[in-house]
Amino acid sequence: MLAIFVDADACPVKDEVYRVATRYGLPVAVVANAPIHVPAGFGAQLVVVGGEPDAADDWIAAHVEAGDIVVTADIPLAARCLAAGARVLGPDGRPFTEDSIGDALAARQLHAELREQGLLRSGGRPLAEKDRQRFLASLDRLVREARRGEASGG
């Protein structure tokens, strides 16, 4: 059965995930390093993993199946989930795909090197309302595509 996994510690669109998952009756695994509030009645289950680096990423990668949907801004996790056959969506509503993940990994490496050299500051821009709307539309589309894939046996 199709499920949604949320890399939750820094995820700004958890409420949007709950709305879409409720509309389609999908289970949601909200994976975090520490307890966070997950509202009752939305089919969401909190999974608290250890505080070790990448513990949430490792749990998601170990449990995601082909066709599932993962919400994360973590590019290496996105690559792992794509390799498992999952669909991956960033919090800004932009999907990670087989075609885009290589460029995303390269850009991440370049930015890390520039930060180490002091040529780039950390942190991106805050999530805008248009990003939230794009996220909602993209998540809804991915769920519909995944459900069509389940119905056709693919």
Image (tube, helix red, strand yellow):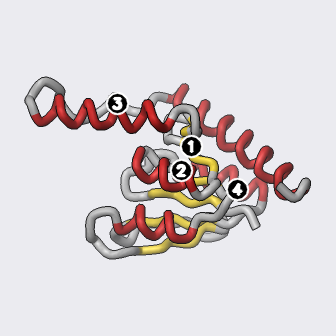
Which of the labelled discs sits on residue 112, or is there none?
Answer: none
Q: Dot 3: what SS? A: helix
Q: Earlier in the sequence, mark 3 or mark 2?
A: 2
Q: Observer-nearest residue: 41 or 11?
A: 11
Q: Is residue 88 above or below residue 131?
A: below
Which residue is the site of mark 3?
Answer: 107
**Residue 132 percent coordinates (x, y):** 55, 35
Q: Are marks 2 and 1 in contact (CB under 8 Å)?
A: yes
Residue at (66% x, 68% y) in the render: 43
Q: Earlier in the sequence, mark 4 or mark 3?
A: 4
| Side of 12 where 44 appears, left or right | right
Marks 2 and 1, Cα distance to the nearest angstrom?
5 Å
Near mark 4 (Cα within 10 A), the count class, few <14, some 14-19 or many ≥20, is many
Which labelled disc corresponds to residue 89? Answer: 1
Counting other residues with Cα less than 10 Å from the Cα at mark 3, is it few (<14), some (14-19), or many (20 or more)? Answer: few
Return the residue at label 2: 71
Looking at the image, the residue that sits furthest to the right is 152
- Look at label 2 and name its amino acid: Val
Name the spot of residue 131 as percent of width and height, x first: 52, 30
